[in-house]
Amino acid sequence: MAERLLLAAGALAGLLGVAFSAMATHRAGGGTLEVSASFLLFHAAALVGISALILGAHVGRKAGLLAGWLLVAGLALFCGDLALRALEGRALFANAAPTGGVLLMLGWLALGVAAFVRR
């Protein structure tokens, strides 16, 4: 079930990435929104891939889920902050984007570790 939730999070990231890309093209100064869209789109593919790796038993379930959920949390903070700044001119909260960026890096690190864990 957790793998399916991770897959659904990847699909949502893809949907939001496409929507934000479209919005960015119609807004003056949409660069920040475009960065958010880009991060969402390429991490959407990563989340779908992580789900497949877990379901195919190519990585350990717990390690794979940890990597995936770190990416989801990082996307929520990083992209959420950038999108809110672009659309409403305010931050999600102080240091949301840098915190999200660190979580994204930890998620990628965890995925690298998960490659060696198969339980």
Image: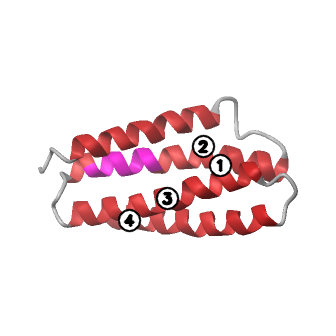
Identify the residue under disc 3.
42
Q: Mark 2 vs mark 4: which is more N-terminal?
A: 4
| SS at circle 1 | helix
Name the one closer to the observer, 106 or 66: 106
Mark 4 vs mark 3: in front? 3
For the point 19% across and 54% down, the residue is: 59
Separation (CA) of disc 2 from disc 3: 14 Å
Q: Mark 4 vs mark 3: which is more N-terminal?
A: 3
For the point 51% across and 43% down, the residue is: 74
Identify the residue under disc 1.
80
Instruction: Let me know if residue 2 appears in the view.
Output: no
Identify the residue under disc 4.
48
- Horizontal and vertical percent for residue 82? 70, 46
- Given contact means CB atoms under 8 Å apart, are the residues at marks 2 and 3 in contact? no
Separation (CA) of disc 3 from disc 1: 15 Å
Amino acid type at image mark 4: Val
Separation (CA) of disc 4 from disc 3: 10 Å
Identify the residue under disc 2.
78
Q: How crowded is mark 1: few (under 14 residues within 10 Å), some or many (20 or more)?
A: many
Would you place residue 9 above or below residue 78 in this image? Answer: below
| SS at circle 4 | helix
Would you place residue 93 above or below residue 45 in this image? Answer: above
Separation (CA) of disc 1 from disc 2: 6 Å
Magenta stretch: give its range. Answer: 64-71
Q: In which quarter of the image is the N terminus?
A: bottom left
Name the one closer to the observer, 29 or 16: 29
Q: How crowded is mark 3: few (under 14 residues within 10 Å), some or many (20 or more)?
A: some
Amino acid type at image mark 1: Gly
Name the one closer to the observer, 1 or 45: 45
- Given contact means CB atoms under 8 Å apart, are the residues at marks 1 and 2 in contact? yes
- Given contact means CB atoms under 8 Å apart, are the residues at marks 2 and 4 in contact? no
